[in-house]
Image (cartoon, rainbow, N blue to C red):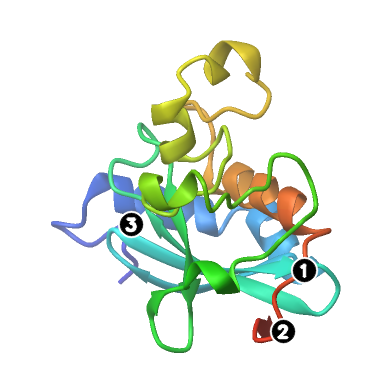
Amino acid sequence: MTAALEPGVDPDQRRLRRHLQAADVEAGVDAGSWRVIDLTWPFLTVAIAVGDDAELGMRLDVQDYPLQAPAGQPWNINTDTPLPVAEWPVSGRNPEIFRPDWSPDNNNGPYLACDRAGITSHSNWASERPERCWNVNRTIGFYLRELHRELSCATMPQNGVAR
């Protein structure tokens, strides 16, 4: 029996499971842009391709999806623990997606308009960056694309996870 048919399964979880099976998410998996590691409600763990030969684990709090944006944080997928700041990817962009001066005070969230931490701390982003901002019509595929877009040119520290 699928989660969509199981009685007592949270409707937000059912919706997320459907969205994880959508063509855009599957296309990202097929292209090697990301992979889904685990969904233990309300947390979704994914791995996002970073640069050419590494990946970053991310743990996403998807409670109240899609009314609330996912709230991501860098995650060690081998130990199932938060990734230390020293192991966060660096892109050379300004601003960085993971900012040591901002992210730790915001649940280690990425500095993105589609992430719950970013939206919460920058209410102006909805009007200034509507094409990149989360709204209730967005899906997990949008979030994963935005995250991958920012990380595609990043590098992991030497102890980063190689693919």
**SS assignment at label 3:** loop
How busy is the neighbourhood of tag 2: few (under 14 within 10 Å), some, or many (20 plus)?
few
Task: Look at mark 2 in the image and give the residue it sits on.
Answer: 158
Sequence order check: which comes first, mark 3 or mark 1? 3
Mark sitting on residue 155: 1
* Residue 31: percent from left, percent from top: 80, 67
Relative vertical location of residue 90 with respect to residue 139 in this rendering, above or below: below
Marks 3 and 1: which is nearer the front? 1
Q: CA distance from mark 2 to mark 3?
A: 41 Å
* Mark 1 residue type: Thr
Relative vertical location of residue 50 with respect to residue 132 in this rendering, above or below: below
* Mark 3 residue type: Ala
Q: Residue visible at 80% across and 53% down?
A: 92
Q: Quadrant of residue 64?
A: top left
* Residue 63: percent from left, percent from top: 29, 48
Q: Is residue 25 left or right of residue 109?
A: right
Q: CA distance from mark 1 to mark 2?
A: 9 Å
Report if the CB atoms under discs 3 and 1 are less than 8 Å apart. no
Q: Residue visible at 47% across and 73% down?
A: 83
Relative vertical location of residue 160 with respect to residue 128 in this rendering, above or below: below
* Residue 10: percent from left, percent from top: 21, 51
Single out the residue that lies furthest toward the front. 101
**SS assignment at label 1:** loop
How busy is the neighbourhood of tag 3: few (under 14 within 10 Å), some, or many (20 plus)?
some
* Residue 81: percent from left, percent from top: 37, 78
